[in-house]
Image (cartoon, helix red, strand yellow):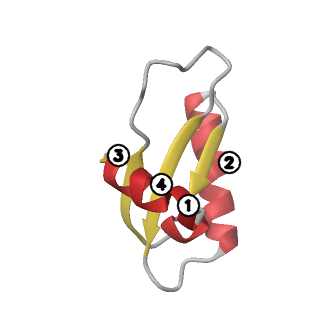
Amino acid sequence: MKIRKISIKNFRGNDTNDSDLDLLVDVLPGTTLFDLGGLQVELEDLLGVPVDLRTPGDLPLKFRAQVLVEAKPL
């Protein structure tokens, strides 16, 4: 897997026990959807919570800039 950076969405205090974990992955060229799907499954198994894994390009333009500013590198 080729990953440049993983960021977590900034918490706003409105998460619950049923909330998922939002991760923004900045991947390098050559990373496939299968790579991302495998990472998502591994993270969910490891952490025991649903994971919403996205790349910056997956985010709607409407709020992409805001998410990128609020994302915190892990």
Q: Residue furthest front?
A: 62
Label 4 to label 1, Cα distance in Å?
Answer: 16 Å
Identify the residue shown where x is 68% and y is 48%.
Answer: 41
Tell me the element at label 3: helix
Image vertical order of residue 19 relative to residue 68, above or below: above
Of the two numbered discs 1 and 3 in the rendering, the one whose residue sits closer to the viewer: 1
Element under disc 1: helix
Which residue does the numbered mark 4 point to in the structure image?
24
Report which residue position mark 3 lands on: 70
**Along the polypeptide, which appears first: circle 1 or circle 2?**
2
Q: Against 46, is 52 above or below? A: below
Residue at the spot 57% in from the left edge and 43% down from the top edge = 43
- Classify 10 Å Cα crowding around label 1: few (below 14), some (14-19), many (20 and above): few
Q: CA distance from mark 1 to mark 3?
A: 15 Å
> Which residue, as the protein is rendered here, is positioned at the far bottom?
30
The amino acid type found where label 1 is placed reads: Lys
Label 2 CA crowd tier, 10 Å (few <14, some 14–19, many 20+): some
Looking at the picture, how far across and down is residue 20, in whole percent?
A: 62, 32
Residue 8, quarter of the rendered image? top left
